Image (cartoon, rainbow, N blue to C red):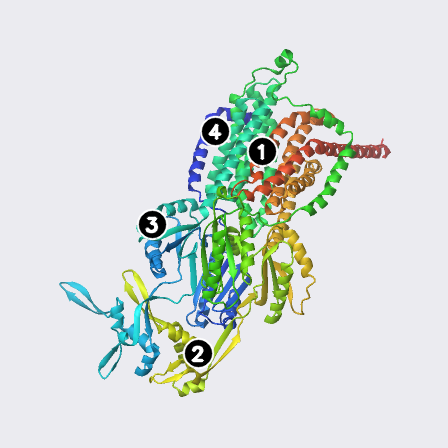
Amino acid sequence: MIARSFNKFLQKQSRAIYLGLLIAVIAGLVGLTSLPSGIYPEVIFPRVVILVESGDMAAQLLLPAVTRPIEESVSKIPGFRQVRSQTMRGTVETSVLFSNETDVELALQQVRGRVGELRSTFPVGSNVTIERLMPSVFPVLSYNLIADNLALPQLNEIAMYKIRPRLLQVPGVAQIQIQSAESREFAVEVDPERLSVLHLSLAQVATAVQLTNQVSVVGRSAEDRQQALIMGTGELFSVDQLKQVVVTSRGGTPITLGQIANVHEGSNDVLTAFSGSGKRAVLVSVIKQPTGNLLEIARAVNEELPRIQAQLPVGVKIQPVYDLAQLVAASIENLRDAIAFGVVLIFIVIFVFLRDWRSTFIAAATIPATVCVTFGIMALGHQTLNLMSLGGLAVAIGLVIDDAIVMIEGVFHNIQSGLSSELATARAVEELSGPIISSTITTVVVFAPLGLLEGVVGQFFIAFCYTLTSSVVVSLFLSLTLTPVMCGKFLRVSKPKKVLEKSDPKIKPAWQMPDLGKAVGRMLTHPRYILGVCLIMLICVIPISGLLERGFMPDIDEGSFVIDYYAPSGTSLADTDQIALRMEDILAEIKEVQSWSRRTGSQLGIAASATSQGDILVKLKPLAQRQRSTQQVMSEVREKLDKRLPGVDLELIQILQDLINDLADSPAPIAIKIYGNDEQVLKELSESTGKILQDIHGVVDVNSHVRPSATERTIRVDPIEAGRFGMTVSDILTQIQAALLGQTPTSVREQEKLIPVRVRYTDAVRKRYSEDLEAMPIFNLQGNVMPLKGLASIESKPGSMEIRRENLARMSLITAHLEGRDLGSAMDEVQAKMAKLKMPPGYYLAYGGQWASQQSAFLNLGLVLALAVILVYLVLVVQFHSLLTPIPILVAIPLSLFGVLTGLAVTHTPLNISSFMGIILLVGLVVKNGIILLTKVEQYQDEGCPIDESVAKAVNDRLRPILMTTICTLLGLVPLAFGVGSGAELQKPLAIAVIAGLSLSTLITLIVTPTLYKLIQNFEANRAEKKAAAKASQRSASPRID
């Protein structure tokens, strides 16, 4: 009655329903235009990175002065989980991990506060950078600025003052990062012999420059009722003016800077090297705001660059290197095509089954309406268009039409019985509302436990489930409102069934299906055979699972990758640069390579690095212009580099994969951490581990992070001798630093630019003194000179280049990548061989990297799967008011695993996060058909039909909707299963798992579910008869009371 009244209400309010849906669709389309786009969801990582740069101070000195104080201080912050540090010459990188429940912004402020309290104890001149690590801090666009006719300092100024301001005006751009090896300076190169004659020190020269280049307000005056400032200035604007700076005077004659120094325009000391496609370059990178729309930002930047290019000097070129928006656009386009192709296939299936354009149109109307409304819900939920959210929508395409198909088929079935369209619709709503709601709820509830997932996996698939769940819920609402309204309004029968049968007995209506009920009825008489087959399938699950490859996240073909290279420790910048140039020559030989940019040296972003290491970002030609995949190109590059550059450690990885690894603190697929206190023992264990990994098939890019220690020259000042000379230890060390590195006492203003003035010895003198420190002259305040060897002793000794720690314990890290082998089997062999390595007392190892992330994710996904089954069972108990009736439906879940694993094995698809997610999704899907079938069986039983007849009739009645919904779901996933195009690889394992499992579960629903249902019904009937007989016997045995 309620359903009929509801349907009557719907028919009366049809115009309001159409209007409401139209408004929702328009709102969804408007919301679509506001959705930001990206390759992945904007993931929140509870991780803060602290980078402290302290010149060239030795790692042994930085450890107690910087590393340990930071580690101990941040470990007291609420929500702290883990701290890792990497200490090398001149740099300390500390990574602080907090719990997922921690407010990361608050934690960032607390870290800044804690480190701020320690800054006064850091070495003088230390530069501290503290950043919250998130995807938006990495560049999304990068360019090379190159020129044949300009030096790097001039290119750097063009980038800083002509390109950077223009690009910062683009909406959504947060930062423009300029990386240049050289920048302009005014160089004041002093001859120490002249200083010695004049009894001057380098510090006095620097002070003279600083005191001359002054601007200050010296007073105020009132003129014509207005107050005017009185300015005093000695500001310097040019080289000529710098030369006129008076340093001292002798006999009343001023001694100018030009008389004792070579003053000219120069550049800073080169600590890094940057190049683009074989030419020295300045790198320009665009970092977007967290909420910025990547596609809009890239479009606006690329539209602005030609206008900027037109205003640059002749010969200066902006060369594109990396554009993440291209991958995003291609991935979104591929998913869009997959959705469209799936929709076309679904339309064909509906028409083939129903052979009626009106019913096809009614069912098909659900898809665009659902998609548009889902976009609006995504906008309300502050979601983004990315591979995961659109992947969820692509997977949902085959599901959103299921409820509409069931409702339409129910209306057709009732029309077949001779009812009018209105009455047929009312009865269909009454009969099917409950099963439709229950079956949809089972699909939705399987995602409820996903809140238990942590890290990258949890946040990635929450975005996936958000769109999938939203679309399924919207489709449920439409199937209960829009679909009945349209059925009652438009569905008509051209010829009754009886007329068709009389005219030609061979002609069947469009909705007539084969009599499968008789076949199922015969199977019900042989339950042992059916159960035996089920048992065999369950047993086969174990050996088949052992054949599967095991991975973490699916690899996508990004069309770009990074080469991280590590020369032997202590290698000079010039030598490392030469090695990198040879690597560039090799890249130029690869026909698929389109462009690249290279960085060598220290100060490369928020990471500790040294002059002996760097990276190369390689961009390949578009997928349509190359025959090989990115992995295949990487394999050739790796082979050539290993062959031609022995002794250089390499790591090749796709850019986004590298980004995710950095964010998740999983440096590589394989990471082995060895803990202990002695540096030499750790070194030996690391080298042994590296050799073990190198002998394992498929393991490449083995990096033990143990390199020969660079030599350190220690100057130990004798405080007694220094005191006799009228100086302190600090005075002498400061003077040595100024002599070798120079001082920047002031800057010269040039319009909006500030050009540093560096006072130092000439390059030849600095080179001579760096090689012969003992001969360096030291000046005291009286202008007396003494060679350094009279004040200090100098010794050379090997130093520790890199010290790694985790939670205040020293460790060594060995990493490796994979080529042509899955993570699971590789780690099985790694663990087996590492078990044979004898560890000294007090030393132990742990496995990290992607393998550790995979193990944690699989454990959590297994828990999610178990909870999903429990939740589905609870829904079924509510639907059928029985604890036993849901069991025949649920048995499809473990049996469908046979289909899933077989499908994965046949297609050589690894069991990874994506395919595991398909198994969880399958839990909600395989029970839908069972609900629809058993609801009809119970309906016939309530009408008095025997169990066998009820099953046979229900199978015949529900065969068409079951086949239609199943085939539509499968065809909706087929485009994703082929995984063609950029980004399609992410959903491919999920699609294959669902297709294989759902195909088998349909047969299980039609055959095994009725068989178990009959056995349970017979069991309950026998138990009821025994209880009734027992009660009857008790009544007959009890004495009568007359």
- Mark 4 vs mark 1: give the one in front: 1
Q: Earlier in the sequence, mark 3 or mark 1?
A: 3
Of 346 and 367, nearer the camera is 346
Disc nearest the viewer among 4 and 2: 2
Q: Secondary structure at mark 3?
A: helix
Tell us which disc is closer to us: 4 or 3.
Answer: 3
- Residues 554 and 275: in front is 275
- Mark with earlier residue (1, 2): 2
Real-space Cα distance between discs 4 and 2? 90 Å
* Residue where numbered disc 1 is placed: 971
C-alpha gap between disc 2 and disc 3? 48 Å
Residue 179 rendering spot, x and y as whole percentages: 40, 59
* Label 2: element kind: loop
Amino acid bearing label 4:
Ile
Which residue bears the numbered disc 3?
Answer: 309
Q: Secondary structure at mark 4?
A: helix
**Residue at the top extreme of this rendering:** 503
**What whole-number distance in Å separates the C-alpha atoms at marks 4 and 1?**
30 Å
Tag 3: amino acid: Gln
Residue marked by disc 4: 17
Tell whether label 1 touches label 3 (CB within 8 Å): no
